[in-house]
Amino acid sequence: MSDLRFAMFGAGWFARFQLAAWGEVEGARCVALYNRTRSKGEALAREFGVPRVYDDPEALLDGERLDFVDIVTHPDTHGQFVRQAAARGLAVICQKPMASTLAEAEGMVEACRKAGVPYFVHENWRWQTPMRHLKRLLDEGSIGTPFRARIDMVSGYPPFDDQPYLRELEQFVLTDMGSHILDVARWLFGEAEGLSCRTDRIHTDIRGEDVATVMLRMGGRTTVVCNMGYPEHHLEHDRFLETYVFIEGTKGSVELGPDYWIRVTTESGTHSRRYPPPTYAWSAPPQDLVDSSIVDCHANILRALQGGPPAETTGEDNIKTVRLVFAAYDSAASGDTVHFSGTGGRR
């Protein structure tokens, strides 16, 4: 099977990791790159051997023979590029957060549905190595039925150093990190029936919230508390972007803790094992936890594009996470609980 040809839209901070991860996956080749600042696109293209660079998205889409596009630009531009690609019958991969508003995100999913093109969201958090093993242990049923859980991604990492535009966002941590953490909650425990949220701003020089706590009732049984934030203060367990999970079940508990350790406690005792991520030449600890998940997410989407099993993170699936993100903002603003129907819409 010949390689699928794709174009990358965007040459910012994350695009470098996205392109490097594609280099680890056989079966896809980046043949063109778009960036509105051409010199920035040319620099990234030279680094990764991408043959052609454009500063006009229409010229790229009309001038290249492509199988799909990979959109790694600012969320405000996602909708435009998704629609342009879909109108040409091209499969689309889009970075999270899908869009800056729920209406725009739903419109993007609908545009791809009407055009009959595959639409994927590059949601990589669930593809972290220890997270995959946590899910496997849950599915095996050793701790019984989960009834309560906590998911924590609270970090002293300074995100504004790498991505200074984040300081200007009216909505920050719920769109940036909540897109990941609420997706993990859905993946582990099923769809939400209700949600309440509280937010805070610890940094004084940013516009949006940098701390959020979301409590959800999920899968008809499990109460899940999601704590997320970039307070950038001193933390006892601050290991870059590690996510910690503690789940109580009817037969025991399981914990994903620091340094990739998973501990399972049942009537037979406590058993622990470490599940570190793979490391690539272009990555290094502790970044490898996130970087390796990009590779695995790529591979899952590429198999679907090649005619294999369906990908996990389609637009149709991820829109359910997007609805939770914006429901969390509504709950934080009103102080009320938001309730959902069985189809994922609000009641």
Image (cartoon, rainbow, N blue to C red):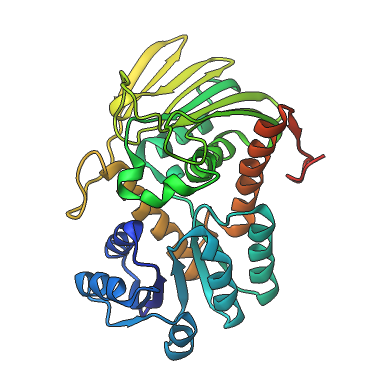
Count of numbered marks: 0
Residue 207: x and y in percent read 50, 41
Q: Residue furthest front?
A: 205
Q: Residue furthest bottom?
A: 63
Q: Is residue 312 above or below residue 182?
A: below
Quarter holding residue 269: top left
Pick the residue in front: 271 or 314.
314
User: Quadrant location of residue 52?
Assistant: bottom left
User: How far from the left and from the top, in percent, is residue 17?
Assistant: 30, 57
Residue at point 60% right, 23% down?
145
| Res. 298 visible in picture | yes
Image quadrant for the C terminus? top right
Q: Is residue 178 positioned above or below 18 on the image?
A: above
Provide residue 292's location: percent of width, then percent of height: 31, 49
Q: Residue at x 35, y 36 (%)?
A: 241
Nearest the eye: 83 or 67: 83
Q: Residue furthest left?
A: 281
Q: Which part of the image, by quadrant, shows the N terminus?
A: bottom left
Quarter of the figure with residue 161: top left
Name the foreground residue: 86 vs 211. Answer: 211
User: In the shown orientation, is residue 201 left or right of residue 155?
Assistant: right
Give the percent coordinates (x, y) of residue 184.
52, 39
**Residue at coordinates 61% horizontally, 80% vertically from top-left?**
87
Q: Is residue 217 visible?
A: no
Q: Residue at x 49, y 69 (%)?
A: 305
